[in-house]
Amino acid sequence: MQWILQEFEDTHKLAEALDRLGIAYSWHKVVPFVGELIPPPVVPDPESVVMFGSYSLWRNAEANGYRPGVFKLRPFIEERAWHRFLLNGPDARIVSLREIPSLGLPGDGHWFVRPVEDSKEIAGAVYDQQGLVEMAGKVLALEVSEIPGGSLRHDTLLMLSEPVRILREWRLWVVGDEVVTYSLYKEGRRVVYRHEIDDDALAFAREAVAANPGYSPAYVLDVCRTGDGLRIIETNCVNAAGFYAADLVRLAAAIDEMG
């Protein structure tokens, strides 16, 4: 497999794992939003290329026919097999950004908000009514032609749901429908990166993966513990998600075997 990396702190950690495995890679800068690579890579076989860095790399992968390239994902909330596992599931409210100012949301309410698509336009976060309307207003004040690719747009679909108190959060990396590595990344409000996971959380994640086989050849699954039990938070594109304290040798080896 040919590995193409954009220079980030996380991709340097990945490069160390690739060095340990004796797998070659090349470094590139990426034009924001467009995904153009500098310098352009020399690619002998477009059918055996994988890219890691910013999410906009998917544009370059698709334009050049790189496979697997970047593993784009279907919106996790639309995966019926996962509805019973979700923290913010089928009861969430789906609205376009242009609808937010006219929703008549209660002034004392708070909502967890994230894009429906795995598009990285904004990170999931909790907003109050004023903050949410102000965020939407800044985008709606722009003409569509003024909005750069990869940013929130007037028609971006957002998921709004009630915030839930989360006790612990883990990220798991799934390749070929198997969990290959994992990392704790949050305890309550405290960010902590440790290569560990509770036994029941790992079993829960494996059950969720098995319930929806073939979702993607590779993806990231974020799960959490709440007062009501274990839940899926979301999925993420494996090519552009933070590595935290994952075992990158195991992850790199699993992905390279696809080639």
Image (cartoon, rainbow, N blue to C red):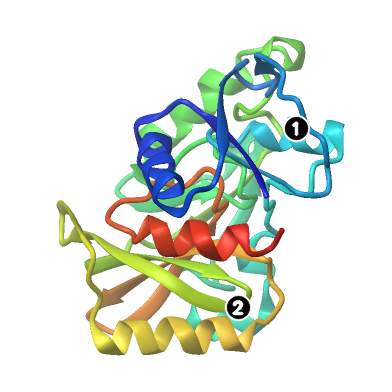
Tell me which residue sits at (59%, 37%) in the image: 55
Could you tell me which secondary element the residue under label 1 belongs to?
A: helix
**Residue 117 in the image: x percent, y percent?**
65, 50
- Mark 2–mark 1 Cα distance, whole angstroms, equals 25 Å
Q: Position of residue 46 (x, y in %)?
A: 83, 41
Task: Rate crowding at label 1 as few (under 14), some (14 to 19) or many (20 or more) other CA atoms within 10 Å.
Answer: some
As drawn, the label of residue 59 is: 1
User: Looking at the image, which is closer to me, 54 or 113?
Assistant: 54
Element class at badge 2? loop
Compared across the picture, whether 185 is left or right of 259 comes to left
Residue beneath disc 2? 177
Say whether residue 172 is visible.
yes
Q: Quarter of the image containing the C terminus?
A: bottom right
Residue 259 sits above or below residue 84 on the image: above
The foreground one among 246 and 250 is: 250
Q: Is residue 114 above or below residue 120?
A: below
Residue 213: image quadrant is: bottom right
Q: Answer left or right for 40 relative to 44.
A: left
**Horizontal relation, residue 220 to residue 152: left or right:** left
The kind of residue on which mark 1 rests is Arg
